[in-house]
């Protein structure tokens, strides 16, 4: 390394380039690592999308299960129905809901990683 | 039941458990191996282990017995036990794994940076764990007593000794293999006899009235009442009696009993005619896993059903032995996939108990009158098939039942011992963990000897209700809500979990008698869960200054995929009590 004082590091400034997306400047990954307000906004957006997916599945589950006791109470003679639904009918929907949620949650995370890493470049 | 086959089957299960545990011991070297199997357990093995651990005596014997005694409403139990995992997946699984904490107290401390909340969570873990261990030991006692002439305490002692030996020797690594093995054992022990029973049912002309209400006797049947009981008759009943009914002795006399409650003394023989409806024994009087959980159903059936749904759906995520297993996943994505696999595995298993329950209503309806309804699964092969085949199938079921006691008890002992070692015993290390294991098992064993005949199986329902009202708010709010504070978390756990505990304790002591209050106390989840959430939220909002400083960073770690957060946690050798703290400071 040449020790010439003329080669000391200088700061170069330019006019603000408004046309570019501002987020391009902020390097989300660093933001997240360094716990800045903007980093928190990123994490919040991920949390919100994950919570939305969870609540959507939860709502489907609630709609599926909550009316059943009322239904059985309204049809006191439908014993076969009760055996069929409670004994054998609910497990497959539970597994399907779980699979749908996992796919959705993993996609949310992949999208988030891609967003962050694209903008890091 | 022929004990010549059942005893070797049980012995074989015990020996196989020790053997598989010893295999785990050979590869369980470091402290991290010991507690979290070095967090390298893949989704499939881990899911099988979780399912093996989760399917307890209540699932293996209790559900069929409940259905036999009380009909299809009781099928809400297995549905709830399964759906609990869906809620765990939605709100807890991945963030919990990413939190890097090993136990619920670790989680509380990592999230809230408070020793006080940590200790409170630890107290609840030990309490819930002991409540859940008690019925496992008693179930083992019942099974061995039904199969052989062994005294009631023998089964519990055998389970306790085997569990302490495997857990203390091999820790988490060893019980991962043991429990995966026991899932397949339990499924086989349920499935194979069920197939033969279904064939026998077909050969019998496939009678369908198993699904009718109430259950009826399909042939003349003599029932000997072993312990005195109260019969509740909805309709008049004609029965031939030898013995004492309502204080009056009879000898081979035909009685027309009007609707209402009748007391039958012990030793009385009742002969029911073909087609007679099976009367129901009064709940409180005949104990056992099948009957006691349903207290309070009579008065408010709809309220009780919703209470049960809420407790089981939300309680699963806070059960200490369930939560611990999630820390053994390598990362958050694996934790999620593991949960889906668990849903499939336990869902498949729970298709079988209703079959036993329905067949039990057909072929062994009189069990509803004895204290042995839980034994329906054990007795059906002998009753329906008989001969050598029946004996062999009965032995298979008995082995599966013992696997159920052993696996659930190991998981609970592991969780309780972990908390005891970290927070109660003075110094840390594998030797103290072994001491913790002995203490974790000794207390419920002593309790099961002391409380003896009480309907302790209420403990399972109690454990779910307490867990749903204390840990569920802590986990859900801790993971999704930034403004949770240590005072809020502590208050919520105390108010929610504490009130659920008091309510069921009051019911077990048969404090309020009957009426709306009784139903409220017997099924606390419907009010205690909202109470827990509400207290946690309101107290947190009232103490905004106490939000821990690192909250944003911690929540980021909970939710960011591992590739971003840089927390490739868990591949190092985490010492006991260390993981949460070291990882928090690293972020």
Image: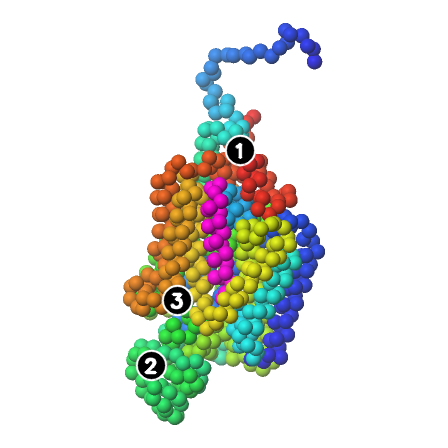
The reply, left or right, for residue B101 in relation to residue B33 is: left
| Residue at the spot 45% in from the left edge and 17% down from the top edge | A18
Separation (CA) of disc 1 from disc 2: 72 Å
Task: List x then y, in percent, for residue B571.
Answer: 63, 43
Q: Nearer the viewer, mark 2 or mark 3?
A: 3
Task: List x then y, in percent, for residue B380.
Answer: 51, 76
| Residue at the spot 62% in from the left edge and 10% down from the top edge | A8
User: What quarter of the picture does the C terminus of chain B occupy?
Assistant: top right
Q: Which residue is mark 1?
A: A114
- Vertical relation: B444 (above or below) B378: above
Decide whether residue B129 is among the magenta residues.
yes
The reply, left or right, for residue B97 in relation to residue B28 is: left
Q: Which residue is mark 3?
A: B508
- Vertical relation: B285 (above or below) B492: below
| Residue at the spot 46% in from the left edge and 73% down from the top edge | B453
Magenta residues span B111-135
Chain-order first, disc 2 or disc 3: 2
**Mark 1, residues whose alpha carbon is within 10 Å: few (<14), some, or many (≥20)?**
few
**Mark 2, residues whose alpha carbon is within 10 Å: few (<14), some, or many (≥20)?**
some
Task: List x then y, in percent, for residue A40.
Answer: 46, 32
Residue B196 in view here: no
Task: Respond whether the residues carrying marks 2 and 3 are from the same subunit.
Answer: yes
Task: Respond whether the residues carrying marks 1 and 3 are from the same subunit.
Answer: no
Task: Respond whether the residues carrying marks 1 and 2 are from the same subunit.
Answer: no
């Amino acid at each position: 390394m040449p020790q010439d004082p003329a080669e000391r590091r200088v700061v170069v400034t330019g006019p603000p380039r408004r046309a570019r997306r501002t987020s391009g400047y902020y390097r989300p990954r660093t933001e997240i690592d360094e716990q800045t307000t903007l980093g928190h906004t990123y994490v919040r957006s991920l949390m919100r999308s994950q919570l939305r997916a969870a609540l959507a599945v939860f709502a489907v589950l609630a709609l599926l299960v909550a009316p059943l006791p009322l239904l059985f109470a309204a049809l006191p003679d439908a014993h076969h129905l009760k055996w069929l639904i409670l004994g054998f009918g609910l497990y497959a929907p539970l597994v399907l809901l779980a699979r749908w949620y996992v796919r959705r949650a993993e996609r949310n995370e992949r999208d988030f990683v891609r967003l962050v890493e694209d903008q890091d470049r | 039941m022929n004990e010549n086959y059942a005893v070797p089957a049980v012995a074989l299960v015990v020996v196989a458990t020790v053997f598989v545990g010893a295999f785990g011991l050979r590869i369980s070297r470091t402290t991290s191996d010991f507690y979290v199997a070095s967090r390298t357990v893949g989704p499939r093995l881990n899911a099988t282990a979780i399912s093996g651990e989760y399917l307890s005596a209540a699932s293996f014997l209790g559900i069929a017995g409940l259905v036999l005694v009380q009909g299809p409403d009781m099928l809400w139990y297995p549905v709830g036990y399964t759906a609990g995992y869906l809620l765990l997946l939605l709100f807890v699984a991945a963030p919990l794994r990413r939190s890097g904490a090993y136990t619920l107290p670790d989680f509380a401390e990592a999230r809230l940076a408070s020793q006080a909340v940590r200790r409170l969570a630890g107290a609840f873990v030990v309490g819930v764990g002991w409540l859940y261990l008690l019925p496992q030991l008693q179930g083992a006692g019942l099974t061995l007593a039904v199969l052989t002439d062994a005294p009631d305490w023998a089964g519990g002692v055998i389970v306790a000794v085997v569990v302490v030996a495997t857990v203390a020797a091999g820790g988490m690594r060893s019980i991962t293999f043991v429990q995966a093995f026991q899932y397949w054992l339990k499924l086989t022990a349920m499935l194979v006899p069920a197939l033969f029973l279904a064939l026998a049912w077909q050969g019998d002309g496939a009678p369908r009235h198993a699904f009718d209400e109430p259950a009826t006797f399909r042939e003349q049947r003599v029932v000997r009442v072993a312990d005195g009981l109260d019969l509740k008759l909805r309709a008049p009943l004609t029965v031939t009696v030898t013995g004492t009914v309502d204080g009056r002795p009879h000898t081979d006399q035909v009685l027309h009993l009007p609707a209402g409650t009748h007391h039958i003394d012990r030793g009385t023989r009742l002969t029911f005619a073909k087609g007679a409806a099976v009367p129901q024994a009064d709940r409180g009087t005949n104990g056992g896993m099948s009957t006691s959980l349903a207290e309070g159903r009579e008065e408010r059936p709809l309220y009780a059903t919703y209470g049960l749904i809420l407790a089981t759906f939300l309680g699963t995520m806070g059960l200490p032995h369930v939560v611990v297993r999630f820390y053994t996943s390598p990362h958050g994505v694996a934790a999620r996939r593991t949960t889906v696999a668990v849903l499939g595995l336990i869902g498949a298993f729970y298709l079988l108990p209703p079959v036993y329950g329905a067949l039990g209503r057909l072929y062994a309806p009189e069990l509803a009158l004895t204290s042995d309804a839980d034994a329906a699964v054990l007795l059906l092969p002998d009753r329906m098939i008989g001969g050598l085949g029946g004996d062999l199938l009965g032995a298979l079921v008995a082995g599966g039942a013992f696997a159920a006691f052993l696996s659930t008890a190991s998981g609970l002992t592991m969780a309780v011992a972990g908390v005891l070692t970290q927070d109660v015993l003075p110094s840390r290390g594998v030797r103290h963990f072994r001491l913790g294991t002995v203490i974790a098992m000794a207390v419920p064993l002593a309790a099961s000897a002391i409380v003896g005949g009480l309907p302790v199986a209420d403990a399972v329902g109690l454990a779910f209700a307490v867990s749903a009202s204390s840990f569920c708010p802590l986990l859900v709010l801790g993971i999704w809500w930034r403004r949770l504070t240590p005072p809020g978390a502590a208050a919520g756990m105390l108010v929610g979990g504490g009130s659920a505990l008091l309510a069921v304790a009051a019911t077990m002591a048969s404090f309020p008698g009957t009426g709306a209050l009784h139903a409220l106390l017997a099924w606390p989840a419907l009010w205690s869960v909202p109470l827990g959430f509400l207290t946690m939220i309101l107290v947190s909002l009232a103490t905004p200054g106490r939000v821990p400083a690192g909250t944003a960073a911690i929540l980021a770690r909970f939710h960011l995929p591992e590739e971003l957060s840089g927390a490739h946690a868990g591949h190092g050798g985490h010492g006991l009590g260390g993981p949460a703290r070291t990882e928090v400071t690293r972020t």
